[in-house]
Image: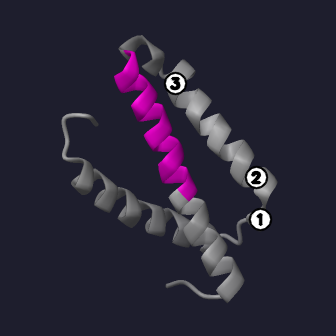
Amino acid sequence: MIKQDLNMKMEKSIVSAKIEAERLFKKNAPPVTIFNVTTNLILEFLRIYFLKLAFLKGIEGLIKALYHSYEKAIQFTYLWEMQNTGKKN
């Protein structure tokens, strides 16, 4: 991730978050709540940082784990928006 241009990475993340949010919306995902957002962001960080051994890469691994959590946050934002407007963007 560090080697790739950050702007390109963020653009791709937004596109993939929209796609995933649309998929979840079509499957009638449970409503987005503070609890499930917080839980999922923490679990995503822990999954990348510890289970995927990102901590072995030092600061690069920390950034990677934080970035994956950020991607999840974007996904939940789009899903929340769809659920509260009743339609996809």
- The residue shown at (59%, 38%) is 44
For marks 1 and 2, the one nearer the N-term is 1
Tally of numbered tags: 3
Tag in front: 1 or 2? 2
- The residue shown at (70%, 82%) is 84
Answer whether residue 15 is magenta in the image: no
Answer whether residue 68 is magenta in the image: yes
Residue type at numbered disc 1: Pro
- Residue 46 sits in quarter: top right
Give the label on residue 15, or none: none
Say which element carries label 2.
helix
Tell me where residue 26 appears, x and y as whole percent.
Answer: 61, 75
Color theme of the render: one colour
- Residue 56 sits in quarter: top left
Residue at mark 3 to residue at mark 1: CA–CA distance: 26 Å
Asked whether, in this view, residue 67 is left or right of residue 33, the answer is left
Residue at mark 1 to residue at mark 2: CA–CA distance: 9 Å
Q: Which residues are magenta?
A: 58-73
Residue type at numbered disc 3: Tyr
* Residues under numbered marks 1 and 2 in contact, where contact means CB atoms less than 8 Å apart: yes
Tell me where residue 1 appears, x and y as whole percent.
Answer: 28, 37
Question: What residue is pinned by disc 1?
Answer: 30
Q: Residues within 10 Å of mark 3 (few under 14, many from 20)?
A: many
For marks 2 and 3, the one nearer the N-term is 2
Question: What residue is pinned by disc 3?
Answer: 49
Question: What residue is pinned by disc 2?
Answer: 36
